[in-house]
């Protein structure tokens, strides 16, 4: 069975990789931990990604594998770094979660920013992270952190969660009238929700700042083309 688990762990089929994690969790804790350690050393990014998602499950069971998450934040493959963000969603109250999310938010990959933003949104919903984290990320000098804020706001808006002091649209309106960085974040977030939210285009159109003109034009084009 162990060879079969290895095959599933690096499959291109996401369902098979998920099956690998289920089979892994049926092993004895010591055997499961050893298997994860072997996966994380693989040259195959998909196997390393599966390993990290499995770590999230094992941490919930009390297995001390935090060091694997810390190391994976620096993995050369964005797929593995993105998996860390998803794994942290399962252990948001763990002491390392917030520190690693802070690192992942800076990531240059939009795919990592997306999962990190989704995780932050979930943790805001659970009361583990405060809304002030969105403000902090939205005003960052780093594009990765601003994208992370935008993706978090998209998740909150699309899920219809009433967890912010003001709703997502009003928060975007506020950002659109503040610093250059927040205007950038507002435009990016509006681009993300524009296909579903008619008000997003109006918010973008009202932003008049040469510093974000290219992003504004791109966002309006993408919304127009659906």
Image (cartoon, rainbow, N blue to C red):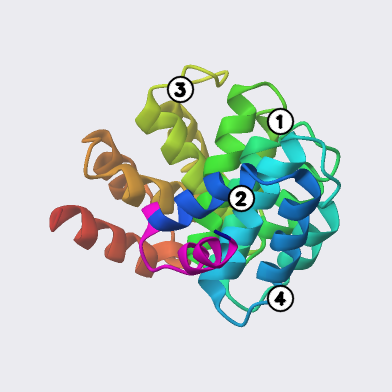
Residue holding disc 1: 129
> Marks 3 and 1: CB-CB under 8 Å?
no
Residue 11 lies in the magenta-colored region: yes
Q: Secondary structure at mark 1?
A: loop
Find disc 4 in the rendering and name its residue.
41
Percent coordinates x, y for residue 47 in the rendering? 56, 69
Q: Quadrant of residue 25?
A: top right
Per the image, label 4 sits on a secondary structure element best described as: loop
Of circles 3 and 1, the one toward us is 1
Residue beneath the point at 62% across and 42% down: 26
Specify few, some or many for label 2: CA neighbours under 10 Å numbering under 14, 14-19, or 20 or more. many
Q: Give the residue drawn at x 66%, y 68%.
A: 39
Marks 2 & 3, CB-CB < 8 Å contact:
no
Residues under labels 4 and 2: Cα distance? 16 Å
Verify whether residue 224 appears in magenta.
no
At mark 3, the secondary structure is loop
Query: Relative to 123, is 209 above or below?
Result: below
Query: At x 13% / y 58%, what residue is drawn?
Result: 225
Q: Position of residue 223 (x, y in %)?
A: 21, 53
Q: Which residue is mark 3?
A: 167
Q: CA distance from mark 2 to mark 1?
A: 31 Å
Q: Is residue 136 or residue 160 the one in the foreground?
A: 160
Q: Tell me the SS state at disc 2.
A: helix
Which-is-in-front pick, marks 2 and 1?
Answer: 2
Q: Circle 2 is placed at which residue position? A: 24
From mark 2 to mark 3, how far is it between C-alphas? 41 Å
| Viewport quadrant of the N terminus | bottom right
Magenta residues? 2-15
Sequence-wise, the earlier of marks 2 and 3 is 2
Give the foreground label among 4 and 3: 4
Please indicate whether residue 226 sits to the left or right of residue 93 in the image. Answer: left
Q: Residue furthest bottom?
A: 43
């Amino acid at each position: 069975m162990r060879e079969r688990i290895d095959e599933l762990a690096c499959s291109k089929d996401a369902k098979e990789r998920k099956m690998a994690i289920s089979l892994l969790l049926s092993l004895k804790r010591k055997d499961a931990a050893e298997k994860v350690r072997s996966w994380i050393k693989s040259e195959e990014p998909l196997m390393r990604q599966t390993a990290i998602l499995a770590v999230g499950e094992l941490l919930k069971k009390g297995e001390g594998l935090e060091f694997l998450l810390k190391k994976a934040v620096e993995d050369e493959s964005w797929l593995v770094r993105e998996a860390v963000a998803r794994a942290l969603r399962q252990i948001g109250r763990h002491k390392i979660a917030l520190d690693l999310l802070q690192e992942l938010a800076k990531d240059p990959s939009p795919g990592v920013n997306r999962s990190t933003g989704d995780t932050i949104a979930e943790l805001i919903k659970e009361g583990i992270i405060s809304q002030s984290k969105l403000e902090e990320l939205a005003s960052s000098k780093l594009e990765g952190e601003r994208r992370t804020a935008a993706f978090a706001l998209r998740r909150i808006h699309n899920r219809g969660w009433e967890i912010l002091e003001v709703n997502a649209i009003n928060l975007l309106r506020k950002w659109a009238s503040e610093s250059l960085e927040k205007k950038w974040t507002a435009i990016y977030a509006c681009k993300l929700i524009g296909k579903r939210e008619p008000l997003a285009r109006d918010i973008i159109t009202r932003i008049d700042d040469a510093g974000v003109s290219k992003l504004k034009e791109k966002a309006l084009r993408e919304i127009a083309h659906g």
